[in-house]
């Protein structure tokens, strides 16, 4: 009888409390990994919108350079409206929706046509020349563009252009900034 009692003590196992704590730790770890995976996948799905933001910022800068090179905008107009950089600026100050460039063809000016919002071409809609396409307005993603043109101290023929694109990608509010310089000379 005595040997039987001794062998029962030597065979002790886990208590119910220990098993429940171990299960709770394991469930917490698995849920943490699942949340991290879901967040990572959601963030990866924003890459298409990140690319669009980069292209729209580059489009604004290219529009300014082209306007200067083609003579549509002079050095005295390449600044924001109401700016201290120059008195007759043509670029809207503050964030604006992405719109059609308007009659002057320059992105970010007061004559932009927001009745015709900017859009991207997405496959799966109307068929044109045997190609199926549909337009998705960028207003669906709350795209906003801010063009800020500032002067460099002691450099009369050089200005800085900063284009900031903000947008909503899923549950993320994102920003893309492009900064470059422009000179009076083309």
Image (cartoon, helix red, strand yellow):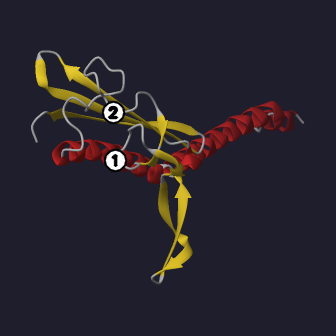
Q: Quadrant of the C terminus?
A: top left
Asked whether disc 2 touches disc 1, contact meaning CB atoms under 8 Å apart, the reply is: yes
In the shown orientation, is residue 26 left or right of residue 124?
right
Under circle 1, the secondary element is loop
Q: In the rendered structure, find residue 81 and report the number of the disc placed on it.
A: none
Left or right of 108? Residue 121 is right
Q: Nearer the viewer, residue 123 or 148?
A: 148
Residue 28: horizontal and vertical position, in percent? 68, 37
Please provide percent x and percent y for residue 178: 31, 37
20, above or below 46, in the image: above
> In which quadrant of the rendered view does residue 30 lie?
top right
Residue 55, given in percent of the width and then of the height, sits at: 35, 50
Q: Nearer the viewer, residue 137 or 66?
A: 66
State the CA–CA distance, disc 2 to disc 1.
11 Å
Pointer 1 residue: 104
Lower position in the chain sequence, tag 2 or tag 1: 2
Residue 132 in the image: x percent, y percent? 51, 76
Which residue is the site of mark 2? 90
């Amino acid at each position: 009888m005595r040997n039987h009692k001794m062998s029962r003590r030597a065979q002790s196992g886990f208590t119910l409390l220990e098993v429940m704590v171990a299960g709770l730790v394991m469930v917490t770890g698995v849920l943490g990994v699942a949340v991290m995976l879901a967040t990572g996948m959601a963030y990866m799905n924003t890459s298409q919108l990140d690319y669009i933001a980069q292209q729209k910022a580059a489009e604004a800068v290219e529009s300014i350079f082209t306007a200067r090179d083609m003579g549509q905008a002079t050095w005295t107009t390449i600044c924001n409206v109401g700016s201290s950089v120059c008195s007759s600026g043509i670029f809207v100050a503050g964030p604006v929706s992405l719109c059609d460039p308007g009659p002057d063809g320059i992105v970010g000016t007061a004559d932009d046509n927001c009745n015709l919002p900017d859009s991207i071409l997405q496959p799966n809609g109307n068929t044109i020349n045997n190609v199926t396409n549909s337009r998705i307005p960028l207003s669906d993603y709350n795209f906003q563009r801010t063009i800020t043109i500032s002067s460099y101290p002691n450099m009369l023929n050089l200005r800085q252009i900063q284009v900031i694109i903000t947008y909503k990608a899923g549950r993320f509010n994102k920003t893309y900034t492009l900064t470059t310089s422009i000179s009076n000379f083309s």
